[in-house]
Each structure stands twice: as structure tokens, then as C-alpha cells.
Image: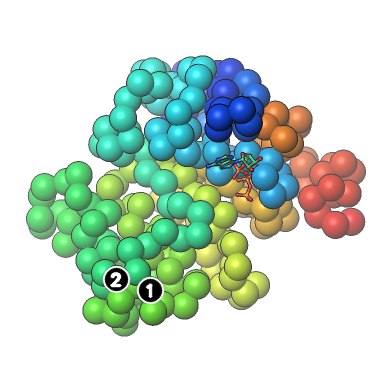
Amino acid sequence: MSDSILQVKNLNVHYGSIHAIKGISFHVQKGEIVSLIGANGAGKTTTLRALSGIADSKGEILFKGQSISTVKTHERIHLGIAQSPEGRGVFPNLTVLENLEMGAYSRSNKTEILNDIENSYLLFPRLKERKLQLAGTLSGGEQQMLAISRALMSRPELLLLDEPSLGLAPKIVAQIFEIIKKLNSEGMTILLVEQNARMALKVSHRAYVIETGKITMEGKGSDLLNDDNVRRSYLGM
Ligand code: ATP
């Protein structure tokens, strides 16, 4: 797996006495979109939190072949891992522009930062229209766009997206997934966590199904979309 940008081996996370992640292993190749799908409470968010270093974990996490298990969150961002959190997690009392600037806090080249802010506006023209508006006053879809853009401001090589479709109208969800595909076609590697299994599997090269802290299935996105168990459990068919 020489092209693996991320390799996770025997990952375990405990919250006190709750064993939330029970020894999962998976990998993401450079250039892929990989999804983790699963029900509410299966452990998807916890897995991302372990990868970005917010949750303490046991096991091995290799980023570009290097162990980052003991590397702090801000250093992981510096190495090239950025997370767009569940519930969007934008700073509500800062403007759109200030949120984007916060996303670039680990960088110092002002010209490049300004360029990347313009690129965010190209990706999401709505953000340009709203650049001086407080993030807390944006619609849910706009906040999601901002959360993704803010994560991109650290120029990651691996983008972790936590439930980008959560609480959004179908039309906005479709737009967000179009952007996910576009980012990937431009070279971004993406690990996507989603309860919306149908949308996730449609855009993913590969996916893993997670159930109560364990990976129970893996395969190509297209194969899982046609799998009877997945259809019954996650696609309502
Ligand atoms: P959701 O889509 O609802 O976020 P999920 O698949 O992301 O679901 P997690 O949020 O990772 O699931 O939760 C996995 C398990 O860990 C659940 O049993 C949850 O109750 C528990 N858990 C999550 N966060 C905490 C916490 N901070 N303290 C204690 N238990 C937690």
C-alpha cells in the first residue's frame, strides 16, 4: 500500500468506560474519496476525532507513512490533515472572511492566503456575497460551505468531512456533493463520514461500513450500493 496517504491499524477509542471504537483498520489511497458509513452512534465522528487528534486513541495512525499517533492536533493540521467538523462548527460571531482567515492560522504567506480566500469564493460564490456577514446568521447550507472552505484554508492533503449533508435540504446536499467530487477531481484526497449512505457511496471510490465501533464491510462504493445488506440497512430498500 505504498500510495496510502492514511493507514489506520487497530484503532481503539474509549470514552471512560464506553469502548466507542473497537480495533478498526482501514486505509485511504492518495486521490481517493473513501466513506465511512453507518448509523447514528456507530463511531464515525469518533474515528475522525481520533484521526485529527481531538480524541485520544490507541493503535497506529500513519499519515504518508509516518506515525502520527503522538502528534498533536495543530501539528497534524500542519502536516496536511484538516477536518470539517460535524454540525459545521463555524465561529458564529466571526464573519465569513474572519472564519476563512482562522482556517489559515497555521500559515504565514499573506499573498497565498488571500489567493486561497479568492479560491473559496470561486468554489462557493455565495460566500463572497456574504463575506462580511456573521457566520452564525448564515443558512445551514452556507455554514456547511464555510466549514469546508475553512478546512481547505490550511491547504490539506487529506480532507476529513464529517456529515456534510446533515440537516440540509436535498438540493443543497446535491450541491455539496458536486463540490466534493470537484475537489477530488482536482486532486484532493477525502475521507467522508456520512449517514446519507446513498449519496456517500455514489461519490466514493471505496467505503467501509461501521457498526457499533467495528468495521463490518468494505468495498467499492458502487458494489456496496448494490449490496443487499447495505440496501436493507442503510438505503431503506
Ligand atoms: P453520529 O452520526 O450520531 O455522530 P457517529 O457514528 O458519529 O454518530 P459517534 O459520535 O462517534 O458516532 O459515537 C460513538 C459512540 O461513542 C456512541 O455510543 C456515543 O454515544 C459515544 N460517544 C461519542 N462521544 C462521546 C463523548 N464525548 N463521551 C462519551 N461517549 C461518547
Binning the other alpha carbons within 10 Å of mark 1 as few (below 14), some (14 to 19) or many (20 upward) gives some
Kindly state the secondary structure of the residue where label 1 is placed: helix
Q: Position of residue 177 (x, y in %)?
A: 56, 61
Image spot of residue 87 (x, y percent):
50, 60
Q: Is mark 1 within 8 Å of ligand 1?
A: no
* Residue carrying label 2: 93
Ligand number 1: quarter of image: top right
The kind of residue tagged 2 is Asn
Considering depth in this image, is 156 or 102 the residue closer to the camera? 102
**Whole-percent x and y of residue 158?**
41, 39
The residue shown at (89%, 56%) is 237
Displayed quadrant of residue 131: bottom left
* Contact check, label 1 and label 2, Cβ < 8 Å: yes
The three-letter code of the residue at mark 1 reads Gly
In whole angstroms, how far apart are the C-alphas of marks 1 and 2? 6 Å
Q: In the rendered image of this protein, does residue 200 appear above or below residue 75? A: below
Residue drawn at (77%, 42%), measured in percent from left and top?
Answer: 224
Residue 120: image quadrant is bottom left
**Is any part of residue 181 visible from this angle?**
no
- Most foreground residue, 211 or 236: 211
- Name the residue carrying label 1: 136
